[in-house]
Amino acid sequence: MQDALIKLALLAAIFASVAMLSQVVLGGAWRRRTQSGAINQRLRMIRDGGTREEIVARLRKNAPSEYANLPPFLASRMRAIQRMLMASAIPLAPAQILMVMGALFLTLCVVLLLSARAGGFPLTFGILQMVVVVAFAAAIALPLMIINIISQRRRKRIEEQFPISLDVFVRALRSGHPIASAIDLLTHEMEDPIGSEYGLVSDEVSYGADLSEALEDMAERWDLEDMRMFVVSLSVQSETGGNLAEILQNLSEVIRARASLYMKVRALSSEGRMTGWMLTILPVLTLVGMFLVNPAFYLDVALDPIFVIGFPALLTLYLIGFIMIRRMVDLKV
């Protein structure tokens, strides 16, 4: 009995020691993570020794452009890709990402064609169609979907941060800070992505740009109506006067009310949006995954003469369904 109690006490002591050690280690790691997470990308780049010119150039690398030299359809697509890359914080220009995807697409086409030939399949037009579609899905469609998911998460994050930044801005104004100083305070207090965006505004104002124009550029980069209302409020107040802190406080309340309504609409439309995502992503993932696991499953079917007509018709129906679902769940609030 005494031996059993001694063993039990030793096990309890070992358990307590391991628990305390894990708490110390994990607690220290969590505190370091919290401290590093409170530093936005711009402050991190300044800490690493980057000059303000280099930082501004890098953060504004994917600022929306007009692409006036391109046809309207291509220009709108390029602006959408550029805005998506900017929101996802990927340090590549649209031309660079398209070149990488194009090179990967051509490489996959060549590899898949050689693999099909080595597997004993003749290079018919149906085989060529299948290879091109699989390479396009793996090299272009899936990366764009992933980038779009990342950009949407960051857009949602900045929409949540913006009312909080207005509250900090209002408190800074009421404590006696001028507007430029209040914005500089936001660059140190707010996390990414909005912390670096306010840092860009602060740097541009330091270089001589007008405050309203710098804030308007920020609103244009993210294409958010809340930011545009903020810019209009500052512009009107600078021309007519008034209590800016009270104006921005009311604006913050309006933005929060709009956000609450928007979340209710998203909750009511969540089933449709999830259905749209599943019907959009699953066919692409299934095509690429099944082709990688068992290429003969598709290549045998591609040898049938009807495949040359049926496969493009299937892709057309997929695109029509994708467009219809997107329009059904694209609710404006």
Image (tube, rainbow, N blue to C red):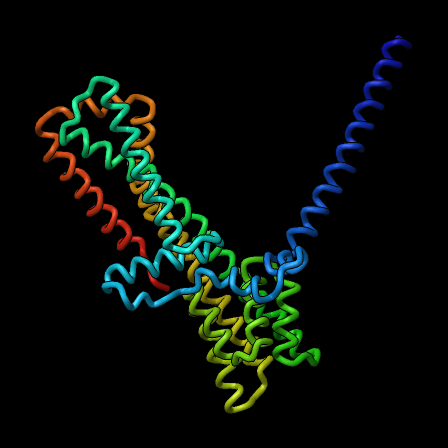
Question: In the displayed image of the protein, which residue is found farthest to the right?
Answer: 2
Q: Is residue 315 left or right of residue 224?
A: left
Tell me the residue at 53%/76% (across/down). Answer: 250
> In the depicted view, which residue is nearer to us: 68 or 297?
68
Q: Quadrant of residue 163?
A: bottom right
| Residue 18, horizontal then vertical, whole percent | 78, 27
Residue 26 is drawn in which quadrant? top right
262 relative to 276, above or below: below
Q: Residue at x 41, y 52 (%)?
A: 267
In which quadrant of the rendered image does the N terminus lie?
top right
When the figure is inspected, residue 62 is found, relative to residue 317, above or below; the finding is below
Say left or right for 107 vs 202: left
Q: Residue at x 58, y 65 (%)?
A: 164
* Residue furthest bottom in the image: 240
Where 299 falls versus 321 (above or below)?
above
- x, y percent for residue 15: 79, 24
Residue closest to the eye, 23 or 256: 23
Total labels: the figure holds 0
Q: Position of residue 6 (x, y in %)?
A: 89, 14
Nearest to the observer: residue 82 or residue 173 = 82
Residue at (26% x, 63% y) in the render: 70
Q: Is residue 147 above or below residue 2?
A: below
Which quadrant: the C terminus?
A: bottom left
